[in-house]
Image (spheres, helix red, strand yellow):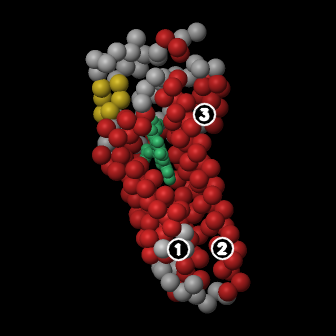
Amino acid sequence: MNNGSEQQIRVWDLFIRVFHWGLALLFLAAYVTEEDILVIHVWAGYLILGLIGLRIVWGFIGTSYARFSSFVFGPETVIQYLKDTLRLKAKRYIGHNPAGGAMILVMLLSVVLTCITGVAVYGVEGAGPMASWLVNAGEWLHEPLEEVHEFFANFTVTLIVIHVAGVIIEGLVHRENLVDAMITGNKRASTAPDTKDLK
Ligand code: HEM
């Protein structure tokens, strides 16, 4: 049974929470500004790369639920978890579940590719850290790079929609507010499944 007096434990440390909401805000800022407010667009991209760089380090040396080793599972486990979710029988994980963990890796990769291709477009235009390599590469590179940058930005948006849907579904299946957990850092300690999870 799930009652309000159940013990809470700290799952997401301060860095993870600042990283998460910082990343979400910066991505939104970069996406809505595009080239209209280039300085915000470009700086949001640099800050995102910096945040993800720190997150990767934290994934090896950080608190236990922040570590990659706690949420990177093999493909069979991810597929089994998705099947169990469809049957409303998915096990509750205190940290990221296998499908969430896989989605996090794909999202981070897609965000990084979005940012790097953005820096490359900027470099062809003669600005930013890649300018010295790319400014003489030829104008022909500009358009294809811009298209790849746009592709990854839109692909990331699709992943974010799936990510938020996953957060809502998992919250409903296990009757917990995962968004609140990403704000406070706390989740209920019990690993016992809710009655709904039992056959
Ligand atoms: C309103 C929008 C969003 C909501 C409600 C939301 C919610 C959440 C929640 C609840 C988690 C923890 C999942 C779990 O319990 O396992 C999470 C993790 C994560 N989300 Fe989001 N998210 C949002 C937007 C975004 C955006 C825009 C991005 C990327 C650009 C993003 C990237 C991530 C990443 C990378 C993690 C893993 C955090 C870590 O371990 O470092 N999220 N999100």
Circle nearer the viewer, 2 or 1: 1
For mark 2, give the secondary structure.
helix
Q: At which x and y percent is residue 189? A: 34, 23
Circle nearer the viewer, 2 or 3: 2
Q: Which residue is mark 1?
A: 36
Q: Are marks 2 and 1 in contact (CB under 8 Å)?
A: no
Q: Which residue is nearer to you in this view: 49 or 163?
A: 163
Q: At which x and y percent is residue 142? A: 66, 80
Against 58, residue 199 (above or below) is: above
Residues at marks 2 and 3, CA–CA distance in whole angstroms? 33 Å
Labels 1 and 3: the sequence-earlier one: 1
Residue 180 seen from this side: yes
Amino acid residing under circle 2: Leu
For mark 3, give the secondary structure.
helix
- Circle on res. 145: 2
For mark 1, give the secondary structure.
loop
Labels 2 and 3: the sequence-earlier one: 3
Amino acid residing under circle 3: Val
Quadrant in the rendering for residue 12: top left
Amino acid residing under circle 1: Asp
Specify few, some or many for label 2: CA neighbours under 10 Å numbering under 14, 14-19, or 20 or more.
some
Residues at marks 1 and 3, CA–CA distance in whole angstroms? 40 Å
Against 198, residue 190 (above or below) is: below
Q: Which residue is mark 3?
A: 78
Circle nearer the viewer, 1 or 3: 1
Residues at marks 2 and 1, CA–CA distance in whole angstroms? 18 Å
Q: At which x and y percent is residue 32? A: 52, 63
